[in-house]
Amino acid sequence: MGISEIQSSANLNATNWDFASQPDNILFSEKSCTCCVGFIDMVDSTRITAGLTRSQMSKYYSLFINWVNGIIRGYGGKVVKNTGDGLLFYFILLGDSHIKTVRNCLNSAITLSILHRNVNKKFISESLPDLNYRISLDYGEVSFAQTVDSTTPDIFSTTVNLCAKINKVADPNKVIIGGDLYRIARNLSGYDFHEIKETISISNRAYPLYTVSEAKTIGEY
C-alpha cells in the first residue's frame, strides 16, 4: 500500500482532518507548580544489555527501576516516567514545607549515589553486570499533562528539559544540580556544593552547574 492509500484509509489527509471532532487523548492542566525535578539515567545500558538474555535484561531493568522508585517515594517524591533506562521524578514545593522538600529531594539523590556499591552487590548476586547511573536535579515551574488512559500525570517545562540535559554532564554515580536549585539550596547545612567548569547554554548565556554530596565532618576527611 502506498503512502497516499495509507493516508486515505487512516483519514490522515490534512484537507479532510476534522480537528474539532478528535478526542483529547492528552489533557493539559492550566495550572503549574514549583517543583524540584530529578532525572536518573543508567550509563551505557544499551551496550551492557546487548549481551544479556531476555530474562537477564528484564531483571536488570526491573531491579534498577524498582529500587530507584522505592527510594524516591520513600522521601516523598513522585515518579512520573520510566524512560526505559531512566526515571523522571519530582517533588512539589508547598508553603511552609518548602525547605524540607528541597532537602528531601537532595537527600533522595544523595542516597542513590551513596548506595551505589550496595545495589551493585545485589546485581552481582543475581549474576548481572555492574550498574552505573547519573543523577541530575533542578528547580522551577512545572506543568502537567495526562493521557486519558493513564492515572499518572506527565510533567513538562523548561526545568524538565534542563534536568535531562545536565544529566549528561554528571559523573557516573554522582549528583549534579542546576544553578536554579543551587540558589535556593546553597545555604542549607549538611551538604557540600562545588561548581564545575562545564556549563550549558540557555538563551546564549552560561547556566552554572554544581555537584552536591553529603557534607563530611572533620574526622571524615
Image: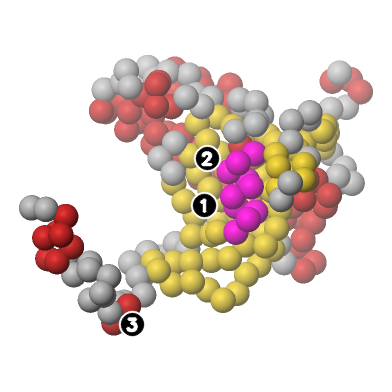
Q: Which residues are magenta?
A: 157-166
Instruction: Give residue 90's quadrant in the image.
Output: bottom right
The amino acid type, in three-letter code, at marker 2 is Val
The overriding secondary structure of the stretch rendered in magenta is: helix
Q: Is residue 29 in the magenta section?
A: no
| Residue that badge 2 annotates | 68
Q: Which residue is mark 3?
A: 20
The picture places residue 70, in percent across and down from the top left corner, at 52, 44
Question: Amino acid type of disc 1?
Answer: Val
- Position of residue 72 relative to residue 211, above or below, is below
Looking at the rendered structure, which numbered label has been put on residue 79? Answer: 1
Residue sitting at x 53%, y 59%: 155
Real-space CA distance between mark 3 and mark 1, rounded to the nearest whole angstrom: 33 Å
In the image, taking residue 66 as reference, residue 183 lies left or right, namely right
Mark 3: secondary structure: helix
- CA distance for labels 2 and 1: 9 Å
The image shows residue 184 at horizontal and vertical percentages of 82, 52
**At x 25% / y 74%, what residue is drawn?**
15
Circles 2 and 1, Cβ within 8 Å, touching? The answer is yes
